[in-house]
Amino acid sequence: MIIERTESPQWTSNSYLVADHEGGHAIIIDGNGVTAPLIEQARQLGVSVDAIFITHWHADHIAGIDDYRGALSAPVHAHAWTRDSIADTVSVDTAVADGDVLEFGDLKVEVLYTPGHSEGQVSLLVNSTDVFTADVLFKGTVGGNFAPGNTGYADQRASVERLLELPAETNIHPGHTLPSTVADELEHNPFVRIWRGLDPEGTDVVTVWDRPATLILWADDYDGTNKAWVRFHDDGSDGITGGSQVVR
């Protein structure tokens, strides 16, 4: 399998070209506004791009989708919720749902529904060896659950834990920045370590959006900033947000 990646200098979001082999079949996963390199790579490899997948509806993952469609003549696939949410911006040809399996040449793509960061968000398991995790799980961190269209902390955690039930050797290709593996995230991801009972929760008191909260975890984020897991005092709810929202 051949995997090529571009990273947006504006958002650090990733777009992927995944091919079975030279001269074979391929898919595109997400748009990030940097389309020319993967279009050229597809041509150099001599592959037929059979589908374009959108993992979720946020702007940093749909930018340039129509450029891909026009250059590669491939249909766009997304969850039905995502399809409806971006209907005024991008036309989705095929709705996909949890458990769907699509085959393109020697590529076998399984759709995993992974909400939390966003309703309608899917991850894609390709050939049972590589999973494209959108904004669910990153190298050393996880997605937040306060973005537009989010479905909450419980869904976010459940989606991460679902992905980490895949075999330890599974390669993780996130929606932003660098790759990882299931084994590495089980061992080193600070959010996951607390969920697994390996590390204790924090106890510092902070304020988030003028709401007192306990800072359960202060961690590095994928873009060089920080991400925080907090528990609000007024209703006991948990949430994961960017560190810039935390007043310490």
Image (cartoon, rainbow, N blue to C red):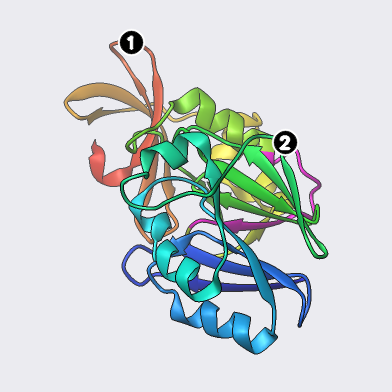
Report the front residue among 86 and 179: 86
> Farthest residue in the bottom direction?
44
Q: What is the x, y in percent for residue 158?
A: 60, 29
Q: Magenta stretch: residue 172 in it?
A: yes
Residue type beneath disc 2: Gly
The reply, left or right, for residue 126 in relation to residue 133 is right
Q: Main secondary structure of the magenta part?
A: loop
Cα gap from disc 2 to disc 1, whole angstroms: 35 Å
> Farthest residue in the top direction?
235
Q: Residue at x 49, y 47 (%)?
A: 135
Q: Residue at x 47, y 45 (%)?
A: 56
Q: Quadrant of the N terminus?
A: bottom right
The reply, left or right, for residue 117 in relation to residue 200 is left
Q: Residue at x 77, y 76 (%)?
A: 24
Judging by the rendered image, the residue that carries numbered circle 1 is 235
Bounds of the magenta span?
Answer: 163-175
Q: Quadrant of residue 9?
A: bottom left
Q: Which mark is residue 16?
A: none
Element marked by disc 2: loop
Report the front residue among 1 and 141: 1
Judging by the rendered image, the residue that carries numbered circle 2 is 99
Residue type beneath disc 1: Asp
Q: What is the x, y in percent for residue 116?
A: 48, 32
Element marked by disc 1: loop
